[in-house]
Amino acid sequence: MWKIAILTSSDQGAAGKREDTSGRFLHESVRTLGTVVDHQVLPDDEDGLAAQLRAWIAQGVDLILTTGGTGLGPRDNMPEATRRVMTREIIGMSEALREESRKHTPLGMLSRNVCAQADDTLIINFPGSLKAVQELLPVVLPVLDHALSLIHGQTEHKNS
């Protein structure tokens, strides 16, 4: 079982003015993959987001799922925060999420989500809307266990 953390980037959510429906959905949806060890709602501040990501990486969290802050708004900083902590980008995963998003809305092409490895941690950025997260999580769920195994040095495919 993997250690999982959920990070919601939302000024309104952090101020208690907006319910964190997308973060709660992620929290509930990944329980079969592992244990959610933390779930935070933070303001859209790049430094604060990067600091939280770093803390979880240092604590040995295996998977960090983020929601919010991936658009074009002036306070959308999650991709930048993720890039500050990553050791390598997983471009194919980001492309798959944008491709699926475009099937549901042309606005999907505006997403700047990043999927990356940071040491032994996998980080996946999702948009902030519950609908988008519900549409996109199924794209990555089938590969998460294998991706995490690879990151942890288990190079043989489990179905081999």
Image (cartoon, rainbow, N blue to C red):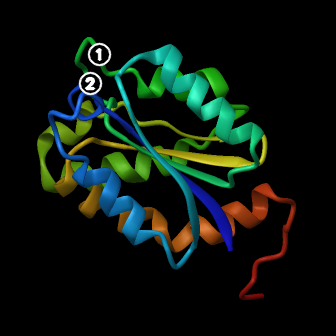
In this orientation, does residue 113 appear?
yes
Q: Is residue 20 above or below residue 154?
A: above
Q: Residue furthest top?
A: 74
Q: Is 72 in front, or is 65?
A: 65
Is residue 126 rendered to the left or right of residue 46? left
Q: Residue furthest bottom?
A: 159
Q: Earlier in the sequence, mark 1 or mark 2?
A: 2
Residue at 57% across, 74% down: 33
Residue at 36% across, 30% down: 112
The residue that label 1 is drawn on is 75
Distance between the alpha carbons at the discs numbered 1 and 2: 9 Å
Q: Nearer the viewer, mark 1 or mark 2?
A: 2
Residue at 15% across, 33% down: 17
Say whether marks 1 and 2 touch (CB < 8 Å): yes
Q: State the quadrant of the C terminus.
A: bottom right
The residue that label 2 is drawn on is 11
The answer to which image quadrant residue 14 occupies is top left
Q: State the quadrant of the N terminus.
A: bottom right
Tell me the kind of residue under disc 1: Arg
Mark 2, secondary structure of its residue: helix
Tell me the kind of residue under disc 2: Asp
Q: Position of residue 147 (x, y in %)?
A: 66, 62
Residue at 21% across, 34% down: 16
- Number of marks present in the image shown: 2
